[in-house]
Image (cartoon, grey):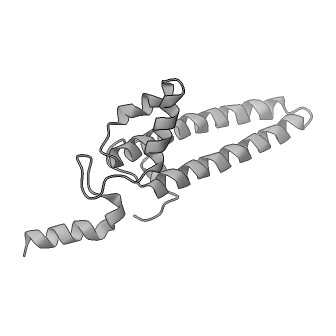
Amino acid sequence: MNNWILRPWLRALDFRGRATRREYWLFALQLALVFGAMLLFAGLAASWEQSEGLSLGLSGMFLIFYVFAFVASLSAAVRRLHDHDKTGWLCLLPLLPIAGPVLFLVMLLLPGTTGENRYGRDPRMGEKAGAAAVGEIFS
């Protein structure tokens, strides 16, 4: 599965495995663009006359999307930390003043461990690595 756009959404409730930098940061960019478009649309809807019902409906839809997007981004961050062979509990690191968010950002930006680690196979190796491993068993 090499669809970098859909992969984080398909794995939104999956906190296992690993995620590459590309997968994580393209997902973060996608969320920023979607949230920006939602804010723009909400601002336009608020300027329309007699839009109270529309605003209430949009608020409900946005809230549902925000909750789902939060869980999806949390699972992507946990998988990104797993790529460093670190526990997902480090997602709490940004709660520490000043140094916490900086350290968390550095971990999200740096490349993960090469090869397999305790959280699974290296996602940068692709599906061929798994096929090669099966081939080694039967050779």
Residue placed farthest to the front in the image?
99
Q: Is residue 64 above or below residue 134?
A: above
Q: Is residue 58 visible?
A: yes
Q: Quadrant of the C terminus?
A: bottom left
- Relative to residue 129, is residue 139 drawn left or right? left
Can you tell which quarter of the image residue 121 is in?
A: bottom left
Residue visible at 53% across and 52% down in the picture: 25
Q: Quadrant of the N terminus?
A: bottom left
Residue visible at 53% across and 36% down in the picture: 70
Residue 17: image x %, image y %? 32, 48
Residue 131: image x %, image y %? 22, 70
Number of numbered discs overlaid on the protein picture: 0
Q: Is residue 71 visible?
A: no
Q: Is residue 119 above or below residue 96?
A: below
- Relative to residue 30, is residue 72 drawn left or right? left
Question: Is 137 in front, or is 13?
Answer: 137
Residue visible at 34% across and 47% down in the picture: 84
Residue visible at 44% across and 30% down in the picture: 93
Question: Is 87 in front, or is 63?
Answer: 87
Residue placed farthest to the left in the image?
139
Can you tell which quarter of the image residue 92 is in?
A: top left
Residue 109: image x %, image y %? 48, 49
Can you tell which quarter of the image residue 98 is in?
A: top right
Residue placed farthest to the bottom in the image?
139
Question: Is 92 in front, or is 104?
Answer: 104
Residue 115: image x %, image y %? 26, 58
